[in-house]
Image (tube, coloured by chain):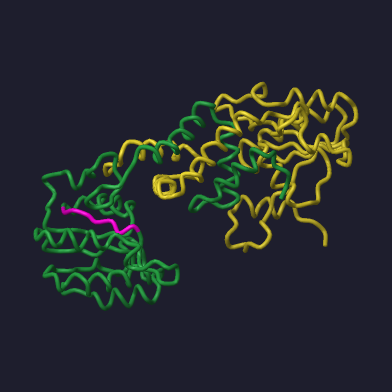
Chain colours: A green, B yellow
Amino acid sequence: MPDFAEPLARLITELKRLPGIGQKSAQRIAFHLLRAAREEAGQLSAAILDVKEKLAQCRVCNNICENDLCPYCRDPNRDPKVVCVVEEPNDIVGIETTRQYSGRYHVLDGALSPLRGIGPDSLKIKSLVDRIGQGEIQEVIVATNPTVEGEATAMYLARLLKPLGVRVTRIAMGVPVGSGLEFADEVTLQKAMEGRREM
Amino acid sequence: MPDFAEPLARLITELKRLPGIGQKSAQRIAFHLLRAAREEAGQLSAAILDVKEKLAQCRVCNNICENDLCPYCRDPNRDPKVVCVVEEPNDIVGIETTRQYSGRYHVLDGALSPLRGIGPDSLKIKSLVDRIGQGEIQEVIVATNPTVEGEATAMYLARLLKPLGVRVTRIAMGVPVGSGLEFADEVTLQKAMEGRREM
């Protein structure tokens, strides 16, 4: 690599640790910050520290929040009988953009992955069982990712939770809306066929 | 948009100001930083401030450097008779990765863009003319971007510098190596045809 001045090289190294940021993007961002107003760089730098300082996990659902309870657990208009289980707090953002879901959430903080040493005890599964034990929850929608780990987690949860007397459902997998069949891989197409519905 | 806790919303806003970072990438990075070790976030935050504090422009070529002179202006083995003119310091990085160029550089800090109010006086053109006036430079390679602004800047420089008795050349435009003709747009193909060479 060419000679970067040391502070620049260090910033590029730090940026490359972020998800989705490779060498080229890191360079672009670093040079952007170099040219940006001191105020902009200062605000970004401070904002990074602030999320570490000021945010915590909701004591009920493990979503990220500033207070003891996240907005969804606090909102009396959200249906307490339905709980959507997701891997990460960011997944809640995606589901909320649909504006169709009005139940509560539960964040697992990951998915089962024996290869990476992540077993049931590493995830927030016990607190989910405790929530169900309180008797109000009737349906658990498992919205873990459609990956090997997410599927394994979904299977595990179904086996664990059904005996507790709740309905356990899994979000549909199939061809994404707006895309063409030609772009879908064979596993997705298989899921789409399996999940077909009467018209 | 869903409710993000305020510090998180602010970090996402700041991240979206970076080049190539949209809403989704900003969310991913913000949630990553939220989960990352406090040390990693602290290092990134500090590195951002450091590039603003510790780096300056080379007094000869306007490249970014820690000292008064950048490594290329300081290196006695670089040919002082050839100067490659680029828009941004980051462009030097690209040219250096070729390991074929051993001359000096000159960073314009942008390109001519009348629409955005960027005229010759906004760019580091006068210092380039001064450098040529010292008599050592024989060739100026104009390596501004193959865009409307970059082309306009190249034309302007050619008209300005040729009367000073230096050779002014422009980097070749054509089909990128490793790509297929089917992916090239018509202007690129036209440039590739115009710039054809004997085999």
A107 magenta-colored: yes
The x, y position of residue B137, in whole percent, is 87, 32
At x 24% / y 62%, what residue is drawn? A126
A188 magenta-colored: no
Residue closest to the eye, A3 or A99: A3
At x 71% / y 50%, what residue is drawn? A1
Query: In the image, B83: left or right of A88?
Result: right
At x 25% / y 50%, what residue is drawn? A96
Q: Is residue A102 above or below residue B77?
A: below
Q: Is residue B133 above or below residue B90?
A: above
Query: In the image, A120: left or right of B106?
Result: left
At x 75% / y 26%, what residue is drawn? B59
Q: Residue furthest left?
A: A135
Specify the principal SS of the magenta part.
strand
Q: How many marks?
A: 0
The x, y position of residue A104, in whole percent, is 18, 53
The x, y position of residue B17, in whole percent, is 46, 37
The x, y position of residue B80, in whole percent, is 87, 36
Quarter-of-image position of residue B30: top left
Residue B12 in view (yes/no): no
Q: Is residue A184 above or below residue A39?
A: below
User: The magenta stretch spans which residues?
Assistant: A103-109
Residue closest to the eye, B59 or A86: A86
Residue closest to the eye, A147 or A45: A45
Picture quarter with the C terminus of chain A: bottom left
Residue A1 in view (yes/no): yes
